[in-house]
Amino acid sequence: MNSNKLISFIKNNRNAVVCYGSFLAVVLGFSVMTKGQIFSAYNLKSLIGQMCVLMIISCGMIFMFGHGTVDIASGAVAGLCSLVITLVLNKTENLGFSIVISIVVSVLLYLFMWFVTAYLGLMSIIASLAVMFIARGIVTYILSLNDGRINIMHYNLIMPFKSDIRLSIAAMAVVIIAGLILFNYTKLGKYCKAIGDNKLSAIQSGTNVKAVMFWCYVIAGVCVGIASLFLLARGGNVGKNIGAGKEMDVMVAVILGGMNLNGGAKSRMEAAIIGTITYTLLANGLTVAGVAQEYITLVKGIIFIVIIGLTLRQNKTVREMPR
Amino acid sequence: MEEKRKLLIETKDLTKKFNDVVAVNKVSIKINRGEILGLIGENGSGKSTISSMISAIHTVTSGEMFLDGKKYTPSSRMDAIDNGITMIVQEAGTIDGLTVAENIFLGDEKRFIKRGIVDGRKMEEEAKKALLSIGIEDIEPSATAAMLSFEERKLVEVAKAVYYDPELFIVDETTTALSQHGREILYKLIHKLRDDNKAVLLISHDLQELMDNCDVLTVLRDGNLVETISKDEFNEDRIKKSMVGREIKGDYYRSDYDGKCDGKVIVRAENLESDTLCDVSFDLKEGQILGIAGLSGSGMHELGRAIFGLEKLKKGRVTTFISDKESEIKSVKDALSNNIGYISKDRDKEALVLPASIKDNLVLANLSKMKFFITKKTEKEFAQKIIDDLNIKCSSMNQAVGELSGGNKQKVSFGKWIGNDSKIIIMDSPTRGVDIGVKTTMYQLITELKKQGYAILLISEEMQELIGMSDEILIMKDGAISGRAQRSAELGEQDIISYMI
Ligand SMILES: Nc1ncnc2c1ncn2[C@@H]1O[C@H](COP(=O)(O)OP(=O)(O)OP(=O)(O)O)[C@@H](O)[C@H]1O
Ligand SMILES: [Mg+2]
């Protein structure tokens, strides 16, 4: 009887189980494997630095996944924005201005995706694919004019974004709190989830789909724009691979957090927050435990498949219950 | 009448649990050949669950079933069909992307395989036969289900169910999805099956319908079998009491016969023309309940969609006059920004977000009225009130709407628009599948809305509902308005039907 209850609890709360289960597993597993090293003060500091970029982007992406858009451009856009910051900084030496420009560029790219999806009726993933190529293309082109690498002339200006852990914490805190509030306590979040589940009913219940999507894309754009600064600070310069693969990291992270990439009612901001922590711990823990980089990618891939498999099954069982 | 009927299927202590919720509790029923057994009970009493277990849509938690005296444990829906049990489900049972023919033979395509591929032409021919056998001529087997109206899709299911020569034919709350014509087809079918010594299980909330068609009635309450009543003991009050466990009193419909409305015009439809509509014009006033009656294909549902901006108009215009501002409705967006609410007949696909909770669904249509920042408390209070008002049966307000019984889903779909800031509400079959007790509440709420000055367009297949509630009834035929009837005590069904045909 008791085990039955447990099973039904797991079934009903699969997302939460994935989210906290994987978190606990990673924390416990690596505490043992690294004999607690992973939680040394030094490593904690580096963990926070490592998770900052991912955390900010993931929080923004919840608004995209939530309404059913799988965005694969975030890495490329972040790369382009890092380049933009570098160029502006090298010209003007004005940090604030360069951040603003980065956010503007990122938001514009996201709004381009929004326009293509909302007005031209293209599948959102296609729009996002297009933007990914555009952003990558621009980065590659500009770098090719500059011997494949652009250095930051005034690195001291953005160095604190890597070295001063408080800046990372503050940025993450702001994004997390804003994300939690917007997603859980405002119209925007509620409309967003409804669109993810059933666009038709959402429309007939008074959702202005285009407007809601507009704001979701803006939020995603702002987050990527901000994250670019930290990405650049950590990278130190702009090479052709900057930001590459970040979109996959984001997906694995939110999936580890129990997010369903189809979006809808089960979407939670916690998926981004806990998922990012779990993911960073995982990647970091494997390194600390001495696993070679090649295997780490493989492990990521396996986790991706396993958890996707679980969440997809869940959808099917829901659909198989016509009454 | 008194000759012994042969037992076809029997359940013994049949039980179904969804997690902790006991939906069906040790129910033992007998279904005899040559008999139409009615199943009645309030929303969420377990009717659909029992029939779903018999037709293998749901698994059985405990208890047994016997078919022709032998133990019956169906493994899949197709297995149930092979055992002669077919069912028309309460919600949509067709798949949008497939053609009518593919829907009819879903799961049974093997029969048409020739040299490794499915012979589409042969399948369509066979589907046409299936449709014709129940007297439907105007549905093309090659059309995709998505192109059909809600009623037509239900009729496709009927054709499918009957095609397999059922020994037991289960009809779950289907009549309310059909217009008069479709209902007649269905009644004729079940009587024919009975006369052929087959069995029928008919689920409905329409007492009159059950009393007219059934030989025996089984009453369920909260998953328990209350009693089985035979035809000579049928009595409306007795059945109602047995269903609810107490006496139902009070006015069912509106009690006044004052159909005059002096409110100002708030919606004006002028010469609407679309694929189905043909030169439709009318005014809807503040505080008016305007009923729309019609047969299938008369355009009554399309008219509702047109006012909500969902129907492509070839000609004509819909205008609203909200606080003296004149605006034309061309899209859903226009409709919403001009305070029009719409309760779609297709609750699963259009009205509800099934995976979302009851609370989220109720709140969704009311977000426009709420502040940008919404606390959990506001949401909860808001949802609880509607759940209490409409007596929505659920384990908590956080339960997914998709897990509710049909009638309870309809209550959510209706409840969304009550207390919403819309001034004009288009209700397409608002009480579909709702039990008598809650219907009474809904009618009271509609009357209340009228008093508050709401303008209501009531589209319904239920003649009694229209006569009982409307200030004026427009009767539609072939896409046009063929007659009008004012509210009066003398108005009868016949007066309206005469305009329909
Ligand atoms: N998939 C499910 N998960 C959880 N609970 C369910 C599920 N399906 C049904 N229930 C519950 O089982 C109970 C019986 O539901 P059922 O659909 O059989 O009612 P019903 O008698 O057909 O009602 P209605 O007249 O509204 O169609 C309800 O309380 C419902 O909430
Ligand atoms: Mg039911």
Image (cartoon, rainbow, N blue to C red):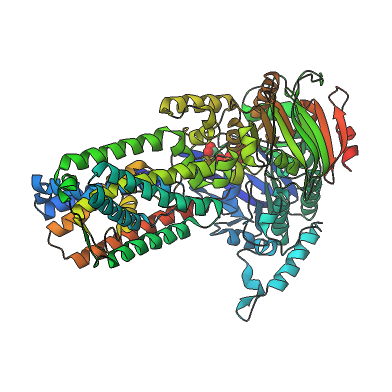
- Quadrant location of the N terminus of chain B? top right
Q: In screen coordinates, is A18 left or right of B501?
A: left
Residue that protrudes farthest toward the front in the picture: A91
Q: In screen coordinates, is B184 left or right of A80?
A: right
Q: Quadrant of ligand 1?
A: top right
Residue B191 drawn at (x, y percent): 79, 49
Residue A201 drawn at (x, y percent): 57, 43
Residue B498 drawn at (x, y percent): 91, 38
Quarter of the image where one finds residue B251: top right
Residue B14 drawn at (x, y percent): 54, 45
Residue B482 appears in the picture as rendered: yes
Q: In screen coordinates, is B451 left or right of A191?
A: right
- Where B100 sits versus A47, above or below? below
Depth check, front residue: B461 or A240: A240
- Where B425 sits versus A44, above or below? above
- Quadrant location of the C terminus of chain B? top right
Depth check, front residue: B7 or B75: B75
Residue A23 appears in the picture as rendered: no
Q: In screen coordinates, is B385 left or right of A287?
A: right
